[in-house]
Image (spheres, rainbow, N blue to C red):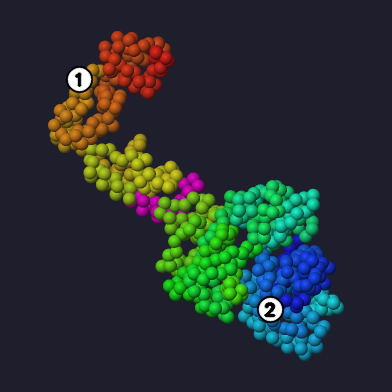
Amino acid sequence: MKNIIVGTAGHIDHGKTTLVKALTGIDTDRLKEEKERGISIELGFANLKAADGARISFVDVPGHERFVRNMLAGVTGIDLVLFVVAADEAIKPQTKEHFEICRLLGIERGIIALTKSDLVDADWLELVKMELEDFVRGSFLEGMPILPVSAPTGVGLPELIAAIQRIAADLKPRNLERPARLPIDRAFVMKGHGTVVTGTLKEGRLKLDDEVRLYPGELTARVRGIQVQGQSVKEAQAGQRTAVNLAGVEVSEVERGFVAAGTGLFEPVQIFDVELEMLGDAPVLRDRARLHFHTGTTEAAAEFRVLSEARRAEPGAKIWARLVVDQPVLVLPGDRFILRGSSPLVTVAGGTVMEIHLGRPRLRRKGAVERLSNWKQLDAAGRMQQLVAERPLGMEQRDIQLRLGFPVNYSGKDLERIGSWWIASSSLKRIASELVNQLRAYHRDKPLEAGLSREYLRTSLLASAPAGGMDALLRHAPAVKSEGDLLRLESHKVKLAANEDAASQSIEGAFRQARLAVPALDEVLKSTGLDAARSKSILALLLRESKLVRVGPDLVFHAEPLQQLKQLLQARRGQSFGVVEFKDWTGVSRKYAIPLLEYFDRERVTRRAGDLRIIL
């Protein structure tokens, strides 16, 4: 079933509410003050089921200049505008402002209803038509129907409904695949149900029992009930006027401007870059001008920053700008907005949100215009690729989704995924080159060392990436070999000079000859005649080659006597013994016995059980 949202627009007292009542039988002026004053103040809502089965929802907006902020909340999410002009008055100030608002919001379809047509003669009616044709020329309303109607007599109403149905047939379907967003325009209590909010579902699907967050706050609620055009449903879809019964929140905690949307999917922001169109009669906007920002049902104070070096926006200009709002708001790339001045309070510009920023990034004008111009041309995958490529160490999947407003199924070759992390292949190649350079410099400075610690290099080169980042990096560095916890260049071979080779043999020989009664480590190293750094490097080499084994911080044994001792113990597998027995079997003093037993515990040759040990 086709769902169409029709929003009214036009000057005060041109008959918008009367026309909606004539079409639907519903008086959208529900407030006592509206009845007394005879003007619309708040948004009004009505429904109509057309002859072809289409469900038409009307959003009636106030026409008075003091209530343009309410009008802006009403035209969010509409499919077409019912642009109302009274035949006896023609174009008036709010006719112009409402028209510009609809144009700036990107509304693509509309019908012009010439109300009160029964009050003028045919010649006058034709003149008003001609004036309107000139007024809308070059806009989205050019070529759209201009229909004379009379609410009291019913003249033109069937033709108006038929025109709405024809336009509705050509409307593009709403995006149901993106996460649901419901800008809230009303919140009230329904007896027996509790808190109810209404709005036009902007995107996605909202289902019974969904958990939603009321952005920009932290409150969460459960969808307890859904109505579309007064009928209870299990699911509301994008483009439908929707009433949602929320469990878990009080009506006092909800207000117009909140957005009900999925939890964990979005992040309210205060800084975003926009493509902006200035109205032709707007004043010059200088950098840091204070304005009123409107998007959906949300309103906030905003500071205006021009991204070009001009630092000003001229009337009629199309520019790139940054907006900094005084409170977090939920906006996403592609959202339309309106800017109004403070004095006088009139519409000055509107446009499209291009990119949102998490946190508070510094403004950098250099290259900003070129970057955003390119960004505008990119599809979702291209924008994801650019975001990731701009960060040398990549980006979390969730942060990408928050920046773009929806998850992207990326299948290109320019990015690589590491768990929930994405990094550009070009970045990995650059970091791989740094890795090779670091290892080359290390091998040059410490030729006797086998390589650098893998963990050291990870924290040095990929500090913010997940642990699997090193494996991805090594795929781009075929010249680097991994050996245990060390990384080295494949070309690196430890080569000892003649005196170093002699020192190596001397150190190894000293421990082999000592068997289990090993000498002090420092004395053996000093006896080589080499400086401390080189003798320690030779010791490290002997340990890596497993010719020597470190049993304690300053206690080293040759591998052969340790292996023989291990075999002696394993020949007694299953036996329990104490330190005294171990000293008797090996002939070592307690000085060596305790460290050796602790070593064999670590090697799982023995297991301690109180004061005894069991041979495994």
Q: Is residue 511 above or below residue 13?
A: above
- Measured as percent of width and height from the top left, residue 355 is found at 52, 62
Q: Is residue 20 above or below residue 329?
A: below
Tag 2: residue type?
A: Thr
Q: Which residue is mark 2?
A: 95
Quadrant of residue 484 within the rendered picture: top left
Tag 1: residue type?
A: Gln
From where the camera sits, is residue 510 visible?
Answer: yes
- Measured as percent of width and height from the top left, residue 238 is found at 68, 59
Which comes before the other along the chain, label 1 or label 2?
A: 2
Q: Is residue 434 above or below residue 28?
A: above
Point 50% across, 47% down: residue? 420
The C terminus is located in which quarter?
Answer: top left
Residue found at the far right of this picture:
153
From where the camera sits, is residue 235 visible?
Answer: no
**Disc ID at residue 410:** none
Point 40% across, 11% down: residue? 576
Task: Determine whether the residue tagged by mark 1 lies in a helix, strand or loop.
Answer: helix
Q: Is residue 400 above or below residue 596?
A: below
**Disc ID at residue 513:** 1
Asked whether, in this view, residue 224 is left or right of residue 545, the answer is right
Point 35% across, 20% down: residue? 598
- Measured as percent of width and height from the top left, residue 163 is found at 76, 74
Asked whether, in this view, residue 546 is left or right of residue 333, the answer is left
Span colored in magenta: 414-433
Residue found at the far bottom of this picture:
123
12 part of magenta stretch = no
